[in-house]
Image (tube, rainbow, N blue to C red):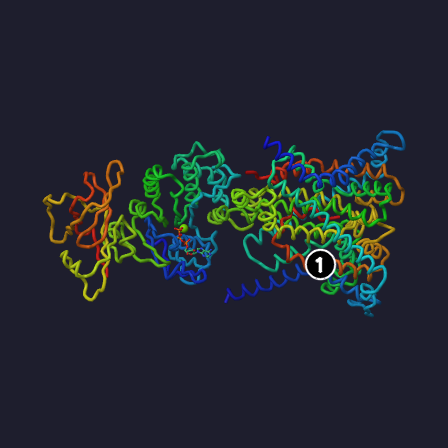
Amino acid sequence: MKRRRELFVGFLLILPALIVLGALYVYPLILSVYTSFTVGEKYGLANYAKAFDIYWRDIVYSVLISFVTTVVTLFASVVVSGYLRFRNWKFLELMYKLPLFIPFLIVGHAMRVFLAPHGTLNNLLTRILRIEELPGLSRSWIGLVWAFVWIMTPYATLIVLGAFRSLDSAYIEAAQNVGASKWKIIIDVLIPMCRPSIMVAFILTFVRTISSLTIPIMVGPASPNMITVNMMFRVNYFNDWGTANALGVISYLIVMVFAIYYLKFMAAERGGIKA
Amino acid sequence: MVVLKTEGLKKYYGDVKALDDVSVEIEEGELLAVIGPSGSGKTTLLRSVAGFVQLDGGKIYIRGRDVTDLPPEKRNVAMFFQNYALWPHMTVFENVAYGLKVRKLSKEKIREKVEWVLNFLDIGHLANRKPSQLSGGQQQRVALARAIVVEPDLLLLDEPLSNLDAKIRMRIRFELRSMLKKLNIATLYVTHDQEEALSIADRIAVMSNGKILQVGEPREIYRKPVNLFVADFVGVNCVVRARPEAVRKLGIAVPEGAEELSLVIRAEEAVLSRYNASIEKTPHDLLLNGVIVGRLYLGAKTRYEVKLQELDDNIFINSEEDFQLNEPVQVLVKEGSYFLYA
Amino acid sequence: MSVRRFSILKLTLKVVLVFIILMLVVGPFVGIAIWSFARVWYWPSPIPQELTLRYWSEVFRQGRVLDSLILSLKIALLTVGFSIAIAIPAAYAFARYRLPAERILLFLFLMPQAFPQLPVFINLARIFGKMGLRGNMWGIVMAHTMASLVFSLWIITATFKSIPLELEQAAQNLGASRWRVFWTITFPLGIPGVIAGAIHVFLWSMGEFNAAFFIGAPFIQTAPVLMYTASAGYNMQIASVIAIVLMIPSLLFMFVIERFLKAEYIAGIGG
Ligand SMILES: Nc1ncnc2c1ncn2[C@@H]1O[C@H](COP(=O)(O)OP(=O)(O)OP(=O)(O)O)[C@@H](O)[C@H]1O
Ligand SMILES: [Mg+2]
């Protein structure tokens, strides 16, 4: 009886949030899946056929860009976290956190100016290297990855460094003691012992890269494109909701395995503590 | 040959002097135990030698080489961690082999050495297990194996037995001593358990407030403590504050000019007997009169609280005999079981 | 002697490293800062040939820049109000109550972080279109409330969870009802987390593009949407001015909520 009551009260407390999520997230989500299977009045896979036909290169491209971004981001965040685990450096601590709250769109704009053929970076490099002209990185896949890595590294570092710092120092000192260098300790002790957190960083970076629209529209090349940009074009220029949603569902499927791992891991961590 | 030599080590944490001019030496094959109350700087001393503490002064030499500014990985000292710090993602074999891999030994050589040390410590059959599948005692041996397999110049142990329950502790204490003796490795051993130190060490250093008060063999520390603190810290004692006249009446020579004296009595060595029993004593032994004011049954023995008449203070003494409350008794304290400090 | 040479080498290395890090992290913003004052700027001059304050003055002058900023501010404040008001009871339930089908609920509230959100916004825009909510400020507020709910909820849940259960039990023990315990014990102790969550939602909403673009444009333009339009039309000065204005609160508040930062909780930010 008491238990039933508690379940009921808990449910009531969650109810407003649940209604908002149901109406504004779950319903559109279902609609997107439903729309992807309808053409006019008929059901079928025509939208998927079309999506693959026109955009198969872009789908592969999106996965590759996201993968490269994720690998570079993880590498950078492990280097920064490893450094900060062993040494205090206020400057680096500040620098890695600085980009955390800057909206993606603004980063996109700033990167576009920074990486343009006559942008800030080339302005600086041509003077340092005494070269007349350098190719611009914006509107190329390198510029795109550059901007993504710039945005994603702080988040990944926050996760990885948090895990590194909460690891008992004795494990590190034991390795130092038998003669291991800092690099070796990072590779042999810190990374394997913090694998779950690194996995979370990996997943979040990948999912957020592949689902970002603003960065590719600001700095990505005109072609090939990330599928998010294709979705926008389909809706804005062709009013073609079917293909746009087919692309959306494809992006769900690409992240599916990661998402499920993430959900399981997080659900275990976020479960309530009860008396 | 001197393996470890520290000269005037200093370490301050704000106002706290964790190390205050600490100098110790350890010979080849010798086991030096450092004892002292909590917060006296034992761990700090050990971690300085390992290289994990940035010193504020002093020098550390290992086999004559100045290692003061060397990073931990270049010192060739092995540390044994209180919670073992076995890497959970590696097997026992990999844990032990790690230091050898870092030193880039050949595969065969590594296998040979690891197997030797595992067998030496009687854990050869556990090589392929993960640390989580081992008992506490087994984990401890693996940690020891990992520390000694790299043939360090010096072994550092910080309260290695404190995680074990009292019964196993006794047994492991002897095992540990015999293993270390067989290895013949110079060892710095930190503990706050004075009994453990007395039984395991070749020499003992007593620390308090970052200072070393006395260094000597266990017998010397126990029988000839240089000051009140050392006398009181080792053994089970009773410290009585007394006026010089009262002490003089007992027939003990009293230093001149002292206002008040501290008499440390090794309660564990005091003998309780009936009021009228005849007792043999030398002139330097101490015979005191008292009354039983409290008793506590302990099984094999009974613990008595005795009010001493001459000194106007109470002392706790264990005895196998049976005494009643309010019964007058005599307390015999042999020469060398009491110390007087101004 | 060799020791000194070594430390000079080290110092040089460090200076070079600092320079590279600054160029990588702060560099991108130097360009837009200069652009925001430029009237004429041709390659290869390192600085603009002519400077002007004209574009900055638009921030304070009646017109589309100011309008878009005010619209963004209104939306952000409304979003903070709704999002936090809905998140607090839910967070308390997640932290302290046994829930029916708890695992499914957890999955549901974590899903928006694990899956791409863009398709959801696109379809939401379509739904709102049929309801006449497109080009309407309230449509954007609703979308923002939903999307920010899933991270404000977790920030506040974490705060409630970090309050020792004993503190509540002690009050209950003295006869306080659950309702009273919440308002006199849990909520006051949880205020820092609630504030952190609110700041977070505010910053996110101010910079959000996807929902604002699909639901609002072209009828109403929030500051980010205007920035996008300007940047796409190579109106670098206007875009840069808005970018800087939007960045200022982000940098200011970062220091306020820094200690509440836990990456998993801010995973909701993006676009
Ligand atoms: N990292 C630190 N920061 C500040 N003070 C410290 C630090 N490490 C040790 N201290 C202080 O230095 C003193 C000596 O500490 P240490 O750990 O060496 O004591 P210990 O003798 O090992 O004690 P225990 O028997 O409790 O292990 C203590 O007062 C302690 O509070
Ligand atoms: Mg200690």
Say which residue appears at 27% left-offset and 51% top-offset.
B217
**Ligand 1 located in image quadrant:** bottom left
Q: Which residue is mark 1?
A: C249
Q: Is mark 1 within 8 Å of ligand 1?
A: no
Residue B169, placed above or below residue A90: above
**A171 and B121: which is toward the camera:** A171
Q: Is residue A49 left or right of residue C14?
A: right
* Residue A152 image position (x, y, % from top left): 69, 49
C42 or C178: nearer the eye? C178
Q: Residue A121 in the image: state x and y as whole percent.
A: 74, 60
- Quadrant holding the C terminus of chain B: bottom left
Q: Height in image: B92 above or below B341? A: above
* SS category of the residue bearing label 1: helix
Where is residue A275? Give x, y as percent: 54, 38
Residue C85 visible in the displayed image:
yes
Residue drawn at (42%, 63%), measured in percent from left and top?
B57
Q: Is residue A184 visible?
A: no
Could you tell me the amino acid type at mark 1?
Pro
Towards the viewer: C223 or A19: A19
Residue at horizontal 21%, vertical 49%?
B307
Outermost residue to the front: C175
Residue B179 quadrant:
top left
Q: Is C122 above or below relative to A85?
A: above
Task: Please tell me how crowded label 1 is: few (under 14), some (14-19), or many (20+) other residues with Cα within 10 Å.
Answer: some
On screen, residue B284 versus residue A143, left or right, reads left
Residue C74 placement: quadrant: bottom right
Chain letter for the residue marked with disc 1 in the picture:
C
> In the rendering, at what x and y percent does residue B175 appear?
33, 39
Left or right of B119? Residue C21 is right
